[in-house]
Image (cartoon, rainbow, N blue to C red):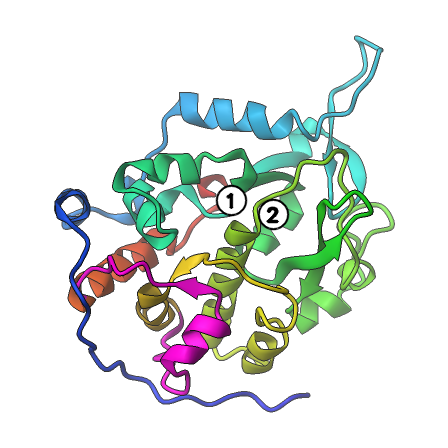
Amino acid sequence: MRDRARLEFGVQAKSAVIGLGEAYLASLAELLSESAGATVETQGKRCGFDQDTFKARVGGQYAEVSDDPHRTPRLWCPITKIYHVARVITTAHIVPYRIKNMHAAYIFGRDPGSGYEVIWDKRNGFCLHITVQTLFDEGHFVIVPDGTSEDGVDEFKVVVLDEELYNEEYPIAPGVTFRGIHNHRLEWGSTARPAKRYLYFHFLLSIFRRRKYAVTDWGQDRIELSPTQVWATPGSWIRRSMLRPLAYEIGDWDCSELSESDLESELGTFDDGRSLPADEEARMATCIRNALTDLTASDW
């Protein structure tokens, strides 16, 4: 068993350059006033039309093609590598909708009004067996890049982080165990793939949560699965100034051993010169933490 990293708690406030403009500030003010008295249950409610449209757009890429009109509809799970009846398949968000549009736009460096396009992007979702999805949401395993296909399409593999889950012999589907799929490439029914940036964000949240609950080997997981190891050349995916607030709020981790160059090179971040003040980013990270608290499978 690898030694678990031990880090001191506490966060040191840092000054931030204000260069965002009135659009972000107005949107943030609206968001924070809405969230001030909100509970987790009232945050980020989704429209039924949005969810139905998302489900149709994503699910259509995983549906079994059959000429038999009487055949029960089935959907492909790229992890179990099996077509399952539709009732045991869920269309899952990778970046959960409860993070809200403004959060998503800011974190991923989009214009203030385009967070909706992030949350409901069909590349922010895929079909998974319901048992698999719950474990994915809880950070028991992550999905990381695994090169490209002969056609140049991005490929991915499963990395099981939970040792107990890895040793579990009970199958999640006929003949499928997590030991059997660990470090194995996902199989897809089409060329459809989720976007790396969304899987990367989910990966970071999973590592932060493992840090919070002092899961054995979380520090080694972060090192071995860092962008320089498995994400090849990470894009400018996550706003750099949000990494420390998110790590602190979600993982009780102040990133004290990471320099600014580490955040730039190791963690696949960007700095567009439009960051909010540090206290505003801290409040945003708190909102995100609250939104992610006690999520159920239907909230992703």
- How packed is label 2: few (under 14 Cα within 10 Å), some, or many (20 or more)? many
Q: State the residue at coordinates (26%, 61%).
A: 273
Secondary structure beneath label 2: helix
- Camera-nearest residue between 129 and 150: 150
* Residue occupied by mark 1: 297
At label 1, the amino acid type is: Ala
**Image quarter hosting the N terminus:** bottom right
- Camera-nearest residue between 16 and 69: 16
| Span of residues in magenta | 251-277
Residue 166: in sight, yes or no?
A: yes
Q: Quadrant of residue 290?
A: bottom left
Q: Residue 52, how many percent across, how many down?
A: 49, 23
Residue 29: in sight, yes or no?
A: no
Would residue 264 appear left or right of 285 to someone viewing this image?
Answer: right
Q: Is residue 180 magenta?
A: no
Q: Residue 236, how many percent across, how many down?
A: 46, 58
* Residue occupied by mark 2: 133
Q: Residue 48, how many percent across, how many down?
A: 41, 23
Q: State the residue at coordinates (18%, 61%).
A: 280
Q: Is residue 98 above or below residue 225?
A: above
Q: Are marks 1 and 2 in contact (CB under 8 Å)?
A: yes
Q: Is residue 162 above or below residue 7?
A: above
Q: Quadrant of residue 248?
A: bottom left
Q: Which mark is drawn over residue 242?
A: none
Residue at far top of view: 69
At label 2, the amino acid type is: Gln
What is the CA distance from the residue labelled 1 to the residue labelled 2? 7 Å
Q: Residue 211, how many percent across, how many down?
A: 47, 76
Would residue 191 appear left or right of 268 to someone viewing this image?
Answer: right
Whichever of labels 1 and 2 marks the residue nearer the N terminus, that label is 2
